[in-house]
Image (spheres, helix red, strand yellow):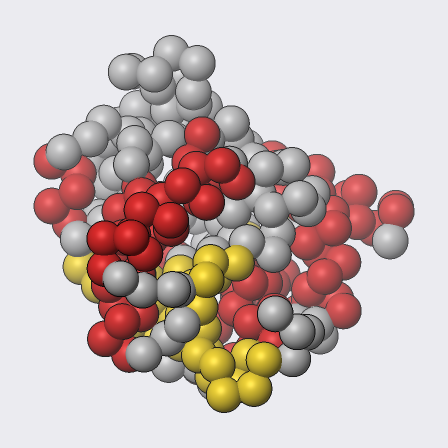
Amino acid sequence: MSENTPKEHCLVIFSGGQDSSTTAAWAKAKFAKVSLIAFDYNQRHKIELTQAKIIAKKLDLPLSIIPITFFENLVESALFLNRQDSTSKMHKDHSNLPASFVPNRNALFITLAHAFSQKIHANHLALGVSEADYSGYPDCRGEFIDAIIHALNLGSQTRITIHTPLKSMTKAEEFALARDLNILDLILEDTHTCYEGIRDRRHAWGYGCGICPACELRKAGYEKFLTDF
């Protein structure tokens, strides 16, 4: 596929966070048409969906928010709104993963987005997963992404291509990409990453509690961006 793909439509799995917002801007620069899809799974940081609407409007991209609140009845995670567990601890069912891990979340998101892609005639999917700078989630690995899109294409007789432009990037490199895409101010001011849903505390790197794993990762990435880029 060439760098410029005219007349092609990309659906971005979107949350209103740094990763997906950067991916959305990347897709807008690359594809002729871009749409966004977000999921309400009764996440602890549901404020991200409010921010997703703001960011979608600023990027001038259509956004569909799909309710899947049933999901919290199927899996265990500290990331659900009605859970009191600390996101800094280890997962109850997966002792080698953080409590914020949501089993099968990316599998469900990609499956639903793949279905929606067919409805809106999008032949590309994009999501902002990263292997280089993430919390150890196994469903962010390239081998998983490649496997599930292959299975979905087989099962629906489609040839939808999936893109993970941030896969090998650190958070510092993501900030640099945002700068190059002219959305660094949007990333700092409008995106939401904090697992606790805190938006009344503004730091140099954005809003958040400053102590949850997501905030710590973002803070460290921004500081490295300032020194290295």
Q: Which residue sits at x=39%, y=64%?
A: 160
Which residue lies most toward the top here?
Answer: 95
Question: Compared to 89, does 156 lie above or below?
Answer: below
Write down the quadrant of residue 175 in the picture.
Answer: bottom right
For residue 38, say whether it is visible: yes
Where's residue 173, x and y in %? 74, 50
Where's residue 120, x and y in %? 28, 79
Residue toward you, 10 or 130: 10
Query: Which of the image's four quarters has the N terminus?
Result: bottom right
Where's residue 154, x and y in %? 29, 53
Residue toward you, 45 or 181: 181
Q: Is residue 187 left or right of residue 52?
A: right
Which residue lies most toward the right here?
Answer: 228
Residue toward you, 84 or 30: 30
Question: Compared to 40, does 28 lie above or below?
Answer: below
Q: Is residue 59 left or right of residue 107?
A: right
For residue 200, say whether it is visible: no
Q: Which residue sits at x=46%, y=62%?
A: 161
Q: Which residue sits at x=43%, y=23%?
A: 98
Q: Is residue 197 left or right of residue 158?
A: right
